[in-house]
Image (cartoon, helix red, strand yellow):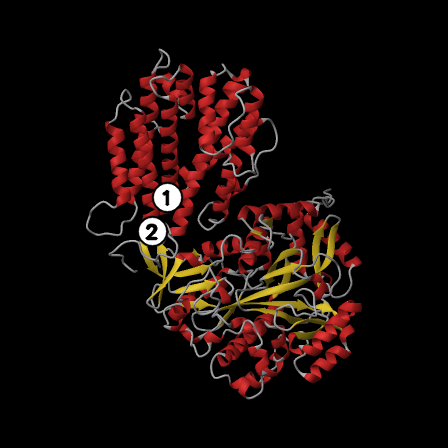
């Protein structure tokens, strides 16, 4: 007779049921999981977690963090130079589709209300004229931009993309905490959270019918395109640069949406049109998703001290030639003081109450409201009215009045008397909680939800299904205590209906095939060129150090080099600024010299570490165009374990991996050409110098062997010549053999090939300066012989290589604010 097997301890349903039961036994009413503990969706989610983590939830946390790191998710705290890993919880917040429908309707209603108010404030200002909005509320805000008054934006809309922070109360109601209108951040993090969770909990999408993000982003992209005048517009994402706290998110969004990631220096406004400066000349830009502080966007219209904006951009927008998302000046409605008037304005303007109410707010610029705030100070939050720190408060965050005591309270009340319009009072909100994985298991933490809305092609609002949750570090449920949160979580909107797979990729038969990779801004070309040069420069310096370490300091690695050869190696390193000249060529001094040349991070020496730092900076600023593996290798920490030879070997393998990735994984685009051009130019300079130092007629056997080592050509030489080392064949192999990928001849051939493939500005068929220099280099090298290659010829070649670098920079890279660098330029 058959018997039923006992449930396996590895059965995910056992772990899921136990986790939910144990967790809810400890938590109070108001937790989203405990309120729906019998909801099969939560059970399904924890079963998926158990399938990944087994009995240890920390495994799931580590796994989702690895996936987030693989995607390249990161952020930076203002004032810090290094990025931090994005803190993602493996437990998503689950919201049922019917509940989400209410949030969606409330967000769309609020977005349209904000648009209506902005159109009035920058238009006829009837709301101020009728007394519905106090004039001081507008004029007193630093985010009200007077130059925008009377300007009708292209497409007729001020808002294209907004973010709203929501809080869920203990009884389940949702309230609006904050509106983000100037440069809303976080949509990219929501996308990255979903990608990481999907890789971790692969079966969750199918089991719960989780709504996808792709239709939302498609609607936003289509909405921007519909507001443009041209049928096939060029759209850019304007970033402050790689030191911005959310630059990683911006790069991910640009890559995902197919937008051009640009900085202010990349753009030029000419004759009321906006252009991006590219290697092929100026190209029209029709729309900008702005992530700059709007006050810095155009120094001619707003802050004249701005060095990251685009002079003339607002004139181009006023002429209807460029759409800006969002229109500068929208931030006036972000002020907490405006929240006090939105419920009344909603009733007056729409005839309906807000579907998602604000937290109760009182603006102290009104006598009655100020008196109430002062009377109930211990039961309220007090904060800045306009997002600017007033004299009576520390910081920009609202603070519980009960916690402001003594002289601080006296200073607050005194300043509220002098400048009451600078303050608001707000009710203290207690947030619902959700489960998060801690070191001891599941724990309840308060959370807020950031929701995103985008205007679609038909003008209606599309709402991202979910957004992302921010989770507080402590169990205190007060929103004011939670601050920005310590963890993030994916938000999964689920329902009974299957969700069709949706991608931003169009149907295979609906788009014209193109092999042109698109526009390459001059700044990006410059970065790729110097990334190639830095990587090759670091590898060359490492070769000098390894030859020195292996053949002169460590006697076990081979025969020691003569002092003259060692002195020449030292001279090469000194001449490129890697380290100061050692006191002597004794072992101890050479060891210290090699250590400085490889590891020094101080004193201005151009060490391997310093070169790596420069390459890493370019990699971080090129996330939208480099593979994640390449960025990860560039970002890898400098080796710290082992001796110098071990560290040098580790770095050498890293350089080889980077070289392989660029050779085998980068598409043969103009960006790759500039990267390879920089590498070839730097290698040509290195080989030229090495031949001048070690390959002259007075060179010793040690010199020639060192030359072969530096050119990584020892094996090639030994395969060809069995009779020993001689100067002429060594010089021919290293300098003039076009079949040797490390030779000078090979480099100049590749340089000339790139020069012929890159775009030119003229249409007369004549060589431009950079092409002429490259052609002459090929001619000189191809007609030279090893026997006659002397210091004079090599010195001339080195000067011409530097001239070629200058010619490339003048032709293709940004030169200050110069918009054009040649006649006959087509403005496309």
> Horizontal and vertical percent for residue 31?
73, 63
Q: Is residue 655 above or below residue 340?
A: above
Quick one: 254 or 398, which is closer to the camera?
398
Camera-side residue: 820 or 796? 796
User: In what element is the residue under mark 2?
Assistant: loop
Drawn side of residue 694 relative to residue 181, left or right: left
Q: Quadrant of residue 599?
A: top right
Label 1, label 2: how far apart the Cα atoms are: 10 Å
As drawn, is 652 to the left or to the right of 430? Answer: left
- Up the image or down, 815 lies above or below 168; here it is above
Q: Is residue 659 visible?
A: no
Instruction: Tell which residue pokes out farthest to the top in this image.
Output: 723
Residue 368 seen: yes
Task: Look at the image and tell me in which quarter the C terminus lies.
Answer: bottom left
| Residue drawn at point x = 28 percent, y = 20 percent | 787
SS at mark 1 in the image: helix
Label 1 sits on residue: 674
Residue 71, position as x, y percentages in the image: 53, 48
Residue positioned 33% across, 22% down in the render = 731
The answer to whether marks 1 and 2 mark residues whose Cβ atoms lie closer than 8 Å is yes
In the rendering, at what x and y percent does residue 510 appear?
Answer: 35, 59
Residue 279 is labelled as 2
**Direction bottom: furthest residue:** 130
Q: Quadrant of the N terminus?
A: top right
Above or below, comparing residue 279 to residue 587 in the picture: below
Rendered position, 62 above or below 260: above
The crowd level at tag 1 (other Cα within 10 Å; few <14, some 14-19, many 20+) is many
Residue 300: which quarter of the image? bottom left
Q: Is residue 345 left or right of residue 719?
A: right
Q: Which of the marked residues, 1 or 2, is nearer the chain's N terminus? A: 2
């Amino acid at each position: 007779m058959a018997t039923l097997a006992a449930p396996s301890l590895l059965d995910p349903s056992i772990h899921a049921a136990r986790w939910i039961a144990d967790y809810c036994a400890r938590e109070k009413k108001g937790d989203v999981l405990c309120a729906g503990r019998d909801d099969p969706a939560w059970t399904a989610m924890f079963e998926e977690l158990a399938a990944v983590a087994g009995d240890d939830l920390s495994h799931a946390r580590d796994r989702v963090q690895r996936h987030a790191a693989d995607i390249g998710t990161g952020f930076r705290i203002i004032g810090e130079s290094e990025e931090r890993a994005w803190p993602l919880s493996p437990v998503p917040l689950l919201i049922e589709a019917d509940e989400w429908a209410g949030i969606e309707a409330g967000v769309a209603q609020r977005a349209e209300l904000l648009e209506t108010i902005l159109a009035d404030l920058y238009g006829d200002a009837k709301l101020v004229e009728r007394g519905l909005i106090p004039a001081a509320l507008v004029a007193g805000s630093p985010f009200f931009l007077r130059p925008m008054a009377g300007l009708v934006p292209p497409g007729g809309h001020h808002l294209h993309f907004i973010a709203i922070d929501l809080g869920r109360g203990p009884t389940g109601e949702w309230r609006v905490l904050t509106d983000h209108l100037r440069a809303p951040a976080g949509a990219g993090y929501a996308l990255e959270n979903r990608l990481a969770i999907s890789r971790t909990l692969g079966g969750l999408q199918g089991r719960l019918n989780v709504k996808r993000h792709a239709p939302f982003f498609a609607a936003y992209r289509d909405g921007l395109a519909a507001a443009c005048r041209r049928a096939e517009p060029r759209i850019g994402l304007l970033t402050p640069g790689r030191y911005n706290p959310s630059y990683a998110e911006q790069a991910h969004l640009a890559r995902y949406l197919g937008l051009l990631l640009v900085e202010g220096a990349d753009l030029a406004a000419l004759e009321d049109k906006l252009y991006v400066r590219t290697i092929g000349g100026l190209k029209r830009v029709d729309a900008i998703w702005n992530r700059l502080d709007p006050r810095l966007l155009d120094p001619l219209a707003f802050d004249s001290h701005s060095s990251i904006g685009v002079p003339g951009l607002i004139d181009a927008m006023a002429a209807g030639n460029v759409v800006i998302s969002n229109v500068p000046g929208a931030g006036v409605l972000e002020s907490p003081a405006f929240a006090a008037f939105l419920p009344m304005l909603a009733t007056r303007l729409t005839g309906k109450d807000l579907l998602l109410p604000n937290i109760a707010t009182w603006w102290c610029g009104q006598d009655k409201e100020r008196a109430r705030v002062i009377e109930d100070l211990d039961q309220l939050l007090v904060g800045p009215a306009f997002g600017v720190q007033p004299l009576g408060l520390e910081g920009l965050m609202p603070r519980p009045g009960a916690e402001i005591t003594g002289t601080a309270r006296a200073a607050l009340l005194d300043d509220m008397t002098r400048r009451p319009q600078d303050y608001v009072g707000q009710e203290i909100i207690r947030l619902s909680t959700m489960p998060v994985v801690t070191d001891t298991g599941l724990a309840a933490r308060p959370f807020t939800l950031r929701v995103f809305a985008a205007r679609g092609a038909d003008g209606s609002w599309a709402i991202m299904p979910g957004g992302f949750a921010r989770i507080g570090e402590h169990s205190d449920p007060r929103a004011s205590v939670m601050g920005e949160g310590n963890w993030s979580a994916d938000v999964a909107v689920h329902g009974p209906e299957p969700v069709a797979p949706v991608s931003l990729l169009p149907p295979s038969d609906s788009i014209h095939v193109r092999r042109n990779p698109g526009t390459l801004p001059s700044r990006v070309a410059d970065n790729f060129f110097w990334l190639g040069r830095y990587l090759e420069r670091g590898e060359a310096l490492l070769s000098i150090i390894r030859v020195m370490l292996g053949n002169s300091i460590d006697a076990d690695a081979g025969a020691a080099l003569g002092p003259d050869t060692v002195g020449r190696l030292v001279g090469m390193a000194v001449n490129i600024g890697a380290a100061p000249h050692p006191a002597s060529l004794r072992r101890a001094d050479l060891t210290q010299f090699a250590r400085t040349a490889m590891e020094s991070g101080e004193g201005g020496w151009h060490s391997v570490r310093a070169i790596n730092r420069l390459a890493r900076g370019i990699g971080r600023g090129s996330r939208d165009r480099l593979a994640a593996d390449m960025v990860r290798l560039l970002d890898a920490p400098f080796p710290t374990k082992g001796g110098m030879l071990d560290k040098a070997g580790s770095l050498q393998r890293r350089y080889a991996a980077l070289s392989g990735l660029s050779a085998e994984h980068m598409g043969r685009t103009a960006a790759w050409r500039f990267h390879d051009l920089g590498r070839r130019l730097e290698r040509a300079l290195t080989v030229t110098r090495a031949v001048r130092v070690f390959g002259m007629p007075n060179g010793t056997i040690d010199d020639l062997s060192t030359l072969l080592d530096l050119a990584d050509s020892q094996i090639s030489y030994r395969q060809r010549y069995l009779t020993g080392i001689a100067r002429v064949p060594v010089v021919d192999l290293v300098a003039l053999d076009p079949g040797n990928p490390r030779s000078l001849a090979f480099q100049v051939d590749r340089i000339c090939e790139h020069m012929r493939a890159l775009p030119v500005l003229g249409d007369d068929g004549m060589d431009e300066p950079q092409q002429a220099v490259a052609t002459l280099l090929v001619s000189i090298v191809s007609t030279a012989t090893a026997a006659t290659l002397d210091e004079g010829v090599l010195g001339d070649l080195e000067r011409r290589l530097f001239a070629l670098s200058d010619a490339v920079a003048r032709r293709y890279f940004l030169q200050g604010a110069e918009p054009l660098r040649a006649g006959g330029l087509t403005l496309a």
